[in-house]
Image (tube, rainbow, N blue to C red):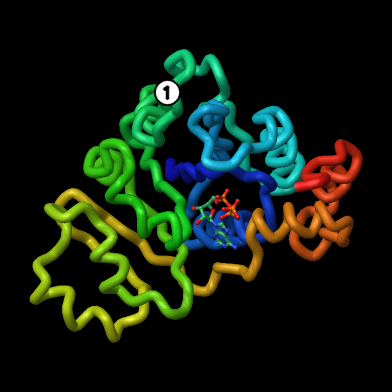
């Protein structure tokens, strides 16, 4: 069975996240997509995140109508997390894989903005080897940008990637230790940052979010005064 792993802060989950997951599920026959809200301890946060429980609840609301889309507690506090320590994707993916069958295949869903930093992630090579990656590309990014985001020893030689700069980021990139599937045309012009700003100003949120999530934000007064 093909399973999608989609991690993020989801603060809040929005239409861009859902569009990525839907496109990935259709293209790669994913029977399940796990939406994994990150549980980053407060002292590790660059900017304070909304409480895990609220972000998890919003993910649960937004994924309700999609068969196979599941809110995940894999990174909830206590889920084998080190006390006070951050959950790293490599640990979470390994934990997930211990619960799956050998024949199951895990696809790691990620937007190209986040993928640009992949080489800095904890045990990046191991993570890239553990699963296929589905990278949602955006106009303006080339195949060379994608290849050059990889840890140095996994990158194809510069002579190979040089001509890639004219090629849009699409298709598959299969290298020793890495399989990347590029998804085109799913990036939507929405970000959680813009939603938090709009919510703080009391603006309507419905065009960016599932209405149930918009309602949840309003009822709980999330992002007020941010
Ligand atoms: P923030 O604005 O707070 O940085 P965000 O909207 O980028 O948040 P995250 O929860 O940080 O959302 O993102 C989780 C994943 O979803 C990342 O891999 C990111 O690249 C991807 N993503 C975020 N926004 C979009 C979008 N509009 N379309 C497609 N993918 C997206």
- The residue that disc 1 covers is 99
The residue drawn where x is 51% and y is 45% is 6
Instruction: Place residue 105 in its image quadrant.
Output: top left
Q: Nearer the viewer, residue 157 or 28?
A: 157
Q: Is residue 132 visible?
A: yes
The residue drawn where x is 82% and y is 59% is 205
Disc count in the image?
1
SS at badge 1: loop
Left or right: residue 157 compared with residue 93: left
Q: Is residue 32 visible?
A: no
Where is ligand 1, by quadrant? bottom right
Task: Please identify the residue farthest to the bottom as the structure is shown.
Answer: 166
Q: Residues within 10 Å of mark 1 (few under 14, many from 20)?
A: few
Residue 17's x, y, as percent?
60, 55
Left or right: residue 30 compared with residue 150: right
The residue drawn where x is 54% and y is 35% is 38
The residue drawn where x is 52% and y is 41% is 46
Residue 99's x, y, as percent?
42, 23
User: Can you say which quadrant of the picture contains the N terminus?
Assistant: top left
Residue 207's x, y, as percent?
80, 65
Q: Quick check: 184 above or below 67? A: below
Left or right: residue 67 compared with residue 184: right
Q: Quick check: 54 above or below 226? A: above
Mark 1: is the Cβ under 8 angstroms from ligand 1? Answer: no
Residue 5's x, y, as percent?
47, 42
């Amino acid at each position: 069975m093909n399973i999608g792993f989609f991690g993020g802060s989801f603060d809040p989950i929005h239409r861009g996240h859902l569009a990525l997951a839907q496109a990935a599920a259709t293209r790669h026959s994913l029977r399940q997509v796990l939406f994994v809200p990150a549980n980053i301890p407060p002292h590790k946060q660059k900017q304070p995140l909304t409480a895990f429980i609220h972000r998890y609840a919003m993910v649960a609301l937004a994924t309700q109508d999609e068969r196979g889309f599941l809110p995940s507690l894999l990174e909830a506090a206590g889920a084998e997390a080190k006390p006070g320590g951050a959950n790293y994707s490599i640990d979470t993916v390994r934990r997930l894989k211990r619960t799956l069958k050998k024949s199951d295949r895990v696809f790691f869903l990620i937007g190209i903005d986040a993928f640009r930093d992949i080489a800095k992630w904890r045990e990046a090579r191991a993570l890239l080897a553990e699963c296929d990656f589905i990278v949602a590309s955006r106009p303006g990014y080339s195949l060379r940008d994608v290849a050059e985001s990889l840890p140095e020893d996994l990158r194809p030689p510069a002579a190979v990637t040089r001509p890639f700069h004219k090629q849009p980021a699409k298709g598959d990139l299969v290298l020793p230790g890495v399989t990347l599937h590029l998804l085109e045309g799913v990036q939507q012009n929405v970000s959680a940052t813009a939603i938090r700003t709009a919510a703080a100003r009391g603006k309507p949120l419905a065009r960016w979010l599932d209405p149930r999530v918009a309602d949840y934000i309003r009822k709980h007064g999330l992002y007020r005064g941010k």
